[in-house]
Image: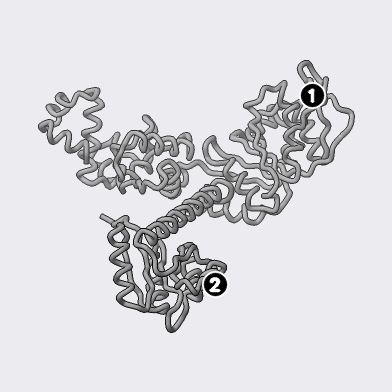
Amino acid sequence: MENQEPSILIVDDDPAMGQMLASMLGDSGYQQTVATSAQEALEAARHEDFDAVLSDIKMPGGSGVELVGQLREIRAGTPVVLMTAFGSIDSAVDAMRAGAFDYVTKPFRRGEITVVMDRALEHRALELENRRLRAAVDKTTAVGDLKGESAAMREIFSLVRKVANSSSSVLITGESGTGKEVVARTLHFSGNRKDAAFVPVNCTAIPEGLLESELFGHVRGAFTGASASKKGLFEKANSGTLFLDEIGDMPLSLQSKLLRVLQDGEIRPVGGTTTTKVDVRIVSATHQDLREQIKVGKFRQDLFYRLDVIPVHIPPLRSRPEDIMRLAQLFLERHAPGERRTLSDGAMRALGRCSWEGNARELENVIERSLAVSDKSELEPDDLLLPSGEVDTSRDESAKDPLDFALSAQLTLRELEALYTKRVLLQTKGNKLQAAKLLGINRRTLYRRGEA
């Protein structure tokens, strides 16, 4: 098992002092590596990421002050504590300005070194946590969530890069759960509007009578209950992006007003008499076929052409199975951060056999539920709470012959045993004694298979 004790690099040209410090820190639970020169310390730092460095300030062949700057180039986040004689405090202050974490003056008491190194390690832990949090924020605000290995997703990545700085309207189409809002957010945060607001609105979530006021705002007294004027989402998104999700469900009466905004670049609040200029990029999304909606009179053709300047279509997950592994890994990291949970090869094959009618959103739900129910570090096929009735029969020969299915799915004997055991347990409604009898095994073997 990997040793989790903090590692300290000790740098002192006096071997006896180096060994004394190593013994002192070792007694306090630290791992220690001793270097007798600045060059030796730099070489060690190139090969190992130490949690902290404790160095003498005066050494032949390179001072501790110089070492601080050189270490920052190799390991920017590693705190350096310097040891100095009482008369060299000015040098220690210079080292602090150069980036040292702290210093101690010789002679020092045994506990003094431990206290300073503890503080240095706390600082290091905080730096690492901040770095992790910044990476997590980047994932949710830029291209981090836009994952995929398929040719279709690579085309979408390429298009997003090309049009991110454009102000042209974008229409994103695709089934529910394919990640239309993720694409919209990526467009916004990858472009020159990223410092302004990204304002999402679901056209189906707001009652028709309130949607106009939400989008365009209203003046005081515009309708019953309007006791004060209110800015709409267009104004909140000024200089940024307004994301209109499920645009196909927008009432026809509002479609004409949206068209006018796109044509004139200005809005008029409900009950108002004056207009306000707005600079907003419109990104829309729908799971519907808007051309069919136009044919039946439910969507304006002129608005469609204003919205469909840059079309982006996201294919369903079942048509790009190579993306399942990448998305599954993303969802593992999202719902079990820092836990190093993984999926076995068999579990990945099981995910690949589902049709994923709910697309990436459904896959994420399955991963989240499975992580919550199982405490295993590596999830196996029988740990996955897969959607019933969603096995893709185009890749599933089980209806013809169970053994053909096992061969086509490339199941190992262990995976096949686990799958069959799970099916028998479902049939017996969890009665392990009855399941063991049907399988022709004892209960101990059944429990062992359940843990496999």
Which of marks 1 and 2 precedes in the sequence? 2
Residue 321 appears in view:
no
Secondary structure under the numbered disc 1 in the rendered image? loop
The residue lying at 78 percent from left, 44 percent from top is 279
Q: Position of residue 116 (x, y in %)?
A: 42, 59
Label 2 residue SS: helix
In the picture, residue 364 is in which quadrant?
top left
Q: Is residue 287 above or below residue 324?
A: above
Looking at the rendered structure, the kind of residue marked 1 is Ala
Quadrant where the C terminus lies?
Answer: top left
Asked where in the image residue 226 lies, by quadrant, the reply is top right
The front one of 344 and 333 is 333
Q: Which mark is residue 228?
A: 1
Residue at horizontal 67 percent and vertical 53 percent from the top = 191
Report whether residue 255 is seen.
yes
Seen from the viewer's position, the closer of residues 78 and 30 is 30
Determine the residue positioned at 24% across, 23% down.
429
The location of residue 80, given as percent across then percent down, is 46, 66
The residue at the far top in this view is: 224
Q: Position of residue 127 (x, y in %)?
A: 49, 55
- Residue in front for this viewpoint, 189 or 380: 189
Local packing at callout 1 (Cα closer than 10 Å; few below 14, some 14-19, many 20+) is: few
Residue sitting nearer the eye, 110 or 373: 110
Q: What kind of residue is marked 2? A: Asp
Residue holding disc 2: 90
